[in-house]
Amino acid sequence: MKKYVVFVAVALAAGAAEQGWYPHEGGLMKYRVNIRFGEEPDTMPDGWKFGRVSAVATDSHGQVFVFQRGKKADPIVVFDSKGKYLRSWGRGMFGNPHGLRVDKQDHVWITDNGDHQVMEFTNEGKLLMTLGIKGKAGTDEHTFNRPTDIAFAANGDFYVSDGYGNSRVVKFSRSGKYLLAWGKPGSGPGEFHIPHSVALDSRGTVYVSDRENNRIQIFDPNGKFLRQWTHLGATQNIFITPQDDMWIITHRNNIENITYDTLAGRIMHIDLKTGRILGAMESPGHWINVSRAGEIFIGSLTGNVFRWYPGWMAGAAGSEEGLRPNNQK
């Protein structure tokens, strides 16, 4: 009996000793990160700083558009690819900044989940189109209820995930004409509990982050349910490149996401055909964008824009990597 007890104790101790960091799903992606893009070095007007950053996107010239909720800067702040301030706009226009995307014309589109609107701007900030009635929540073809994201088809049609108040996806023509909508509250196929993000691949297939149901649902262009992925957690945001590379920022589940306030998330590279995880790395985040140069930008509610770029340290921090005291050259 004593030998048995000793054996069990040794076995338990050995099992505990083997516990450690969980492997990166699909393997580690070898990137480095600038954790304060746009603020280090600080080239914004004096006194400006980010509040909560809800979204970030890049255009065809590498310019970076930041959508933020703080009062110490304009809601939309634009930088060059190195983080130098270029211009800004939008003060007083939005109830609560949420989503921002840039289309193939380099027009800037936002979703405002405070005032229930979707807006299209030129690259320089001229307002071109507004959908939804300011301050009015609704479920018909003229209104939204706290919309979250927007995605574009090759022919110019676009889709809005609508969102926090409604549980649907709405499709419009390029001119803003209502075409159709699908979805209702629930957890079955074609039902949603906070459709938080929407993206299209090159074939027009529609991918919707059904965040509180911990899944991504996949539809044809007219809303016919095709399949779902339930292994990727509570996906905050989806980005699909023109080459059909899928990237997501996600959390283990919806409870962890809300409890940690978007901390403890992971960036994942996903095989679009199978949903297989190709690689992953830790990052806080609410929004993800991959630039044409292959850099990953994350908009974080921590008040940061993270710029991930390919690279990996050969060793631990040394004299060139570590910070030095001010009196040491």
Image (cartoon, rainbow, N blue to C red):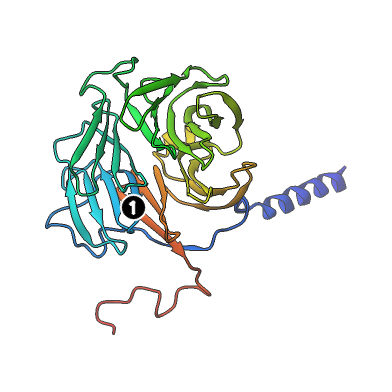
Label 1 sits on a secondary structure element that is loop
Where does residue 201 sit, x and y in percent of width and height?
51, 41
Q: Which residue is mark 1?
A: 59
Q: Nearer the viewer, residue 133 or 44?
A: 133
Q: Quadrant of residue 159?
A: top left
Q: Quadrant of residue 89?
A: top left
Q: Disc 1 marks which amino acid? A: Asp
Where does residue 154 sit, x and y in percent of width and height?
44, 40
Where does residue 127 sit, x and y in percent of width and height?
19, 38
Q: Look at 43% across and 20% down and name the residue there.
A: 181
Q: Look at 46% across and 38% down and name the residue there.
A: 199
- Decide: is 174 above or below 263: above
- Identity of the residue furthest to the bottom in this view: 329
Could one spot residue 277 in this view of the protein? yes
User: Quick one: quadrant of the N terminus?
Assistant: top right
**Picture mark count:** 1
Q: Look at 20% across and 49% down and name the residue there.
A: 124
User: Quick one: quadrant of the C terminus?
Assistant: bottom left
Q: Look at 24% across and 65% down and name the residue there.
A: 41
- Decide: is 164 above or below 120: above
Q: Nearer the viewer, residue 274 or 98?
A: 274
- Identity of the residue furthest to the left in this view: 46
Q: Within 10 angstroms of label 1, few (less than 14), some, or many (20 or more) residues?
A: many
Drawn side of residue 47 relative to residue 35, left or right: left
Could one spot residue 167 in this view of the protein? no
